Image: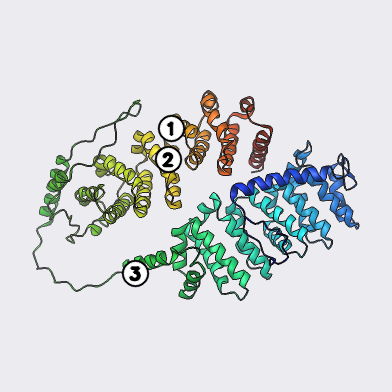
Amino acid sequence: GVGYGSAQPAVSHRVAPFASRGERGERAEQHQDEQAQQVALSSNGQSNGLPLDEPLASILSKRDSTIWSTRAACLSQVAAFVGTEREPELLHPATAQQIVAIALLHLSDAHYRVALSALDCIAAGAHLLAPALEQPLERLMPKLLARLADPKDVVRVRADAAVSALRAALPSDTLLPVLLRVLDNPNARVRAGALDVAAAACAEPEATHYLATGAHMRQCVSKVGALLADKAPDLRKAAAGSLCAMHGAAPAAFVSALASLPPSVQQLARRALADRAPELDAQLSSQQQQGNGRRPTVRAQTPPPVVSAPPPQQQQAQQQAQQQQYVAAVPQPVRVAVGASERAPLKEAPPAQQQQQRLPPGGQGEVTAGGGGDADNALTVGGVSLEWLGLMPTLLRQLGAQQPPSAQRDSLLKIAKMTSVLPTQDPLWRKHFEHVLEAELRLLESEDHDTREAAVHAARELLRSQRDRVIQFTEHVMLRLLAAHRDTSREVCLAAEECLELVVATSDPRRCLAVLIPVAAREETPVLQASIRLISRIVPRMGAAELQQLLPQLLPPLFDAFKSPSADVRKAVVFALVDMYLVLGDELTPHLSELSTSQLKLVTIYINRTTKARVES
């Protein structure tokens, strides 16, 4: 992608599109190394006349000098510390805060070379100063974005590097709320820059989780959508790009948020995204139809004949007789031993003919709930699972492979609602848990996108409700959900990740690792990334001695993944190694000898950052 600092004078002083995540990470790392080397070698071991061995406190004390070259050399020499033996001095919280405060001051300096030194310092050391950058971020971002619109090409290039380094150092869910507040800035160029930075941030995994929350997405869409009517063309274009990125990050949440805005804003969004997201128009129409379909309607019906109700004692006796008759007809499920090395597959649903025969009296597979004869009405009956016991065979039959996707989705929605209504220990689960789980996992491979999405959401509800029963099938469930990460839908992948986190949170860590280690050794992104992130979730639950025994099997696939071309995978490996260090301490260090110098340095930086944050908290 084109960087911020394009040297073309014809480009309006706005932020240009970002490069991809991998290219951006490599560019930031290269820029940090080159910047540090250039500054360190600028004067044969001196930085603009300041010796490299001068105490840091002495260097920082010259920030208020009346001589611009001395002020510029102050942060230039700080940037030269990166990559040298003096780099750890920048990690001290008080020192980092002081450096960030000086950078904030110098970004507004009248002499552009002083501002350049501040930009270079942020570009070179943002990954070290990240904790200190978060607090003043709301004041820092407008100054950086203003420098992106500077008349001098060299300033725009350095500002581009500084913003890229800042984005690499801070998670997107930290950046996005700040960027929304920057949109209140009166400078139109600053607002346009904030929108472009937000658009790039939406491609990050943290942003996907952040935007999938309805409240966050509504805040973003309403704030940015209002700018589609701005009189500045550049600002309207930037707003459209940001909205398109939000739609790509979490389509369902975006459509829901946009549908809640006034029709005039919806129309502007439709026109602005017509070329970038042509599917938006159909998604909005579908959302509105669903909203209208949920509204209650009054229909003229023929009043039923008046029939005198039997006495209460007779009603209760009839219900008990029906329930006993149905329960006796359902065979007991095959139990699978938890410790068995080979597990039998989950039970398939009984044949449709048997299911139909087992239905309690109520008429052709429909179960009456309070006399309504409507399956949806059965969902609202509390405290009695008889209606659900009768309805379940019909729902399982609709989940069959030969059924149309619409019937499968309808059944999945009803089962998800049933899962949220019935108690965890309801007798229905003893009879049908395996049937339901296997049907939902099988539909994760459906050719219909909406069916796969409904299946993973239904599975998530089931795993939340029936954690104790899921433990029996840990390996089977994990493999199915890991395979779902190959899905092209972000919604499916995110929901599958939530399901896996539920499984590993309650299952035995060794059983989970027995699944994840082979997957991490042979799979590619995104399944590889998901498996490594789950390893990070499991490690803190293990004792030091137990984890020490597993290192010979656990570390080789992580070291191989550290060489992955995907920046997301490499980042997941770093976090996994940091989590191991928090359990093992220095006992982990001898096992990291296979890492390269740069890899070991990166892991050490994150270990130091994490341990310091824990001590301060």
Residue toward you, 293 or 335? 293
- How far from the left and from the top, in percent, is residue 195? 61, 63
| Image-based side of 470 in relation to 362, left or right | right
Q: Which residue is mark 1?
A: 515
Real-space Cα separation, disc 3 to disc 2, in angstroms: 36 Å
Q: Residue at x 8, y 64 (%)?
A: 308
Judge left or right: residue 257 versus residue 224.
left
Q: Earlier in the sequence, mark 1 or mark 2?
A: 2
Pick the residue in front: 471 or 350.
350
Quarter of the figure that contains the N terminus:
bottom right
- Mark-to-mark CA distance, 1 and 3: 45 Å
- Which x, y percent locates residue 188? 66, 70
Q: Amino acid at mark 3?
A: Asn
Residue 56 to residue 555: above or below: below
Give the structural element (helix, strand or loop) at label 1: helix
Asked whether residue 424 appears in the rendered view, the answer is no
Q: Could you say whether the residue bearing mark 2 is in a helix, strand or loop?
A: helix
Q: Which residue is mark 2?
A: 482
The residue at which mark 3 appears reads as: 292
Q: Residues within 10 Å of mark 2 (few under 14, many from 20)?
A: many
Secondary structure of the residue carrying tag 3 is: helix
Q: Which is nearer the N-term, disc 1 or disc 3?
A: 3
Q: Nearer the viewer, residue 166 or 23?
A: 23
Q: What is the crowding at mark 3: few (fewer than 14 residues within 10 Å), some, or many (at least 20)?
A: few
Q: Are marks 1 and 2 in contact (CB under 8 Å)?
A: yes
Q: Amino acid at mark 1?
A: Val
| In contact (CB < 8 Å): disc 3 and disc 2 | no
Label 1 neighbour load within 10 Å: few <14, some 14-19, many 20+: some
